Amino acid sequence: MSNSGFSGGGFNRNNNPFGGSGFGGGFPNPFASRGNGKRRVSPLTITFIVLFVLSSVLVSLSGFYADLLWFRSVGFVDVWQTSLFTKIYLFFGFGLITSAIITLNIYLAFRKRPIYVPVTVEADNLERYRAQLEPIRRLAGIGIFLVIFYFAGTAGSRFWQQWLLFQNSTEFGQVDPQFGLDISFFAFKLPMYQALIGWGISTIVLAIIAAAAVHYIYGGIRTQVKEDRTTVAARVQLSILLGLLVLLKAVAYWFDRYALTLKEGRLITGLTYSDVNALLPAKSILAAIAVICSLLFFANIVRKSWLLPTAGVALMVIASVLIAGVYPAAIQQFQVKPSESTKEAPFIQRNIDATRDAYGLTNVEVKDYQATVTTSAGQLANDAATIANIRLMDPNVLSATFRQLQQIKPYYAFADSLDIDRYKIDGKERDVVVAVRELNIDGNPSRNWINDHLVYTHGFGMVGAFGNTVDADGKPTFTVGDIPPTKGLGEFEPRIYFGENVPDYSIIGGPAASNPVELDYPDDNSTNGQKNYTYTGKGGVPMGSLFTRLLFAIKYQEQRIVLSNLINSESKILFNRNPRERIAKVAPWLTLDGDPYPAIIDGKILWIIDGYTTSAGYPNSRVVNLANTGDALTSRSNAVSSLDDRNVNYIRNSVKATVDAYDGTVSLYQWDEKDPVLATWSKAFPGTVKPRSEISAELLAHVRYPEDMFRVQRDILSAYHVTMADAFYGGQDFWRVPLDPSSFGSNSGNQPPYYLTMQIPGQSKPTFSLYTPFVPRGGRENLTALAVVNSDAGDEYGKITVLQLPRSTNIAGPSQVSSNFEAKPEVATSLSLLRQGGSDVVLGNLLTLPVGKGLLYVQPVYVRATGNTAAYPLLQKVLVSFGDQIGFSETLQGALDQVFGGNSGTTVSDNQQSTATPGGVGTSQAIRAAISSLQAAYADLESAQKRLDGAAEDKARARVKAAIAALISAQNR
């Protein structure tokens, strides 16, 4: 047996690396000859193998190079380079070091193998394995190196974000109360230290296993020998490796001390009394014991006994159980539990302070709001501004209405959930329900590759309706709509090439302007019924060259990209077109809000998306899973996306991002100028985020406080509005978000936050705000607080005000108010009538407003025909509640006057914001509608009688009765 290391054993006829005619002693050699001893491989087989490898490489490289071209087209190639090269460095670094350590130990174990092995049964069995390994030893060594290199490198490259944070760490300027270290250590450095420790332990463990296996196979470890069961070389090598392993464990114990500040416990997140007084010193003691144990292993280099190292490991295990397990449990049981509230008070206070700071709740203003439940005439006289802006158009109900009234063609579509913004119209700022008319190629009756990717390339136009007005039939009052778009919001580029519902790719800009092929919009004045267009924007990846066309043909597996004569030197390809997707690629370190919203800014439609910087390394702060902060709106399919499924304990709305709907330009603007996480990422990706000063005044006018951020904050605020440790421990004053009484279809969940222009007590003027109600935890549904955040860009932006209701007054919460509406006989009867005769009632958002020194609830009621795919909701009634009083009328004004003794203090003129009647239809309209329903029902009754259709006759007769009752009710108003 040679002692020359990894030498010998090449590919030749006399020294077959596969062990002669068999592979590993029993498997047939795929390269073995069939007769003359020469290897023969079919040329066809080689061709197939080469083609397969080349095609796999080409497909991979096509996606890789297309990605580079995309980053170049948006001007963020530095992000691509930084991310890629960081991953490459880590891949090679982790891969080389790991594979070098393990294969070096394999080499040393083989090199120091004993020349003579004692004769035993075990040695005879191992000799057969050694004989089989000998011919492929070098190949096996290279294979082991490459396999370890690949898997270790792949695992290491996943730490690229932690590495960049570690490299570019920015101090928070705050220290944790236990260790006195800046929070940046826990947020940016500790995760990388822990990753390196884990990698080191895993590498040493694998090296120990590999070295022990080689020593065993080649006789360095002899389990059947009574004495000298390990050779000197085996003992030295394994002692060093085991000593290093235990030493790394000592380092792990030491850093575990810092990780205790992030530990989730039964009561709080972070250090508790038993952690500080028992577990923290236990970790230090275990670290010292581990250092001693490592020295015992190193001492074993010159000793011939494993007794002391084994005893040291046993001591460490016993100490770990007793010191780190039993002792803290005993402290918790016998010292903490008998007086837990006082023992844990300082640590609960740490948790409260850290959590409020980490989630941006330090400056929340809590006001006592002595809400009244009594009503009187003229009670809303001082709240005319808020009443005037009550939004009766629910953006989560009106999508079907927008589709039927503004879709124009089936190849256009609107989102399932519309958006709320505000615009200055005729000198007044108005809340507007907005949506863009996006392309929906699934609605195109003529589907083929050319239509899908060269003709139908973009949506067209933006639609906006006033939030507080409807026309005489209950339809929204549109301020901008139609094709070409009306000018209610000024001139703007209406084409939507980048949006939430676009094809995966479109090829544009190819044919000359004299012969465009892109469908622009339907036009009755054109000979072919449509206007065509050729894209002129700067967005997209040029694909005029044959190489680029071939690249994308491979990427999308579509040969027509190369063959089509509609693609020429001027053509571009648009892909990665969803606004959230585009921002996620240029800023992979951001967590993005689930609801991009469109706005007309400087003559362009821009998608505005809020970006969050997050961390899971803020000491003593409560951990939240972002995906668990959703509500009834985010649970709806195809409505609003929820946040990523990740745990965080720090969040800031640090970036406002925009995507141009026409040319796809991505812009990131710094919003939170004090966020150290954003500062750290800005060091890693310099120049990616523009300074806040570059935000235009028009963009600032459309910035709003993000819903997802507020969802996270209200989840925290439900408990952490309590700022005293003793009250927090008791938990009697904790809140929760009420269930949504509107019940979006079959989905249930918490009530979403709502945007509304309102003037809360203490404010000098109305502001565009986002608010949420709270009810007590524990089953009761009465209102306990209302949290309102200022959403207008300015000095007060982001200020959260909590109106806390007196505990002695029982104010009905949203669910109770909804039940009260249905329980009132007049309301129940009217809603029952509306639900008959082929109609269905859709309840809109139940709004809660702090006006009239109390709480006013307003809920729009829509009616939609059933059994008709073209039916859509129309506003027909308005429900109002204040205290125990309920109003129900066709108009908001009428409902308010019913509640406040015939005079709410506001008039229709206060509410009048357009030529349409706010709040609903008038009495004459109700009479005409009832007569129309009666005529239709009577005609259906006669038709059923002629057909002798008894079932249809019964249904029609019931509709006639309902229509007569509705007519009588309308006449009596």
Image (cartoon, grey):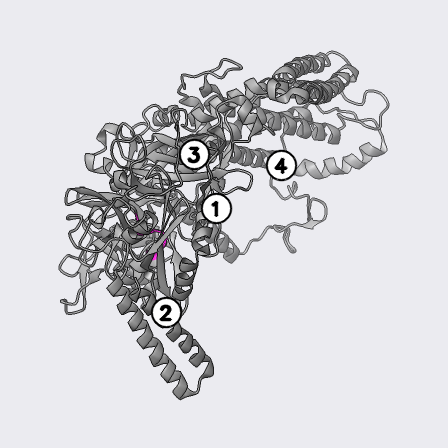
Q: Amino acid at mark 3?
A: Leu
Determine the CA span between mark 1 and mark 2.
34 Å
Q: Residue at x 50, y 34 (%)?
A: 624
From the viewer's perspective, is 958 left or right of 96?
left
Q: Amino acid at mark 4?
A: Ala
Expressed as whole percent of the image width and height from the top left, the position of residue 63 reads 39, 46
From the viewer's perspective, is 446 left or right of 83?
left
Residues drawn in magenta: 391-399
Which of the labelled discs sits on residue 739, or is there none? 1
* Residue in the foreground of this view, choosing between 625 and 286: 625
* Residue in the foreground of this view, choosing between 750 and 970: 970
Q: Quadrant of residue 271?
A: top right
Mark 4 or 2, nearer chain start: 4
Determine the CA span between mark 3 and mark 4.
75 Å
Q: On the image, numbered disc 4 is attached to which residue?
A: 140
Mark 1 or 3, nearer chain start: 1
Q: Secondary structure at mark 2?
A: helix
Which of the labelled discs sits on residue 805, or is there none? 3
Q: Amino acid at mark 2?
A: Ala
Mark 2 or 3, nearer chain start: 3
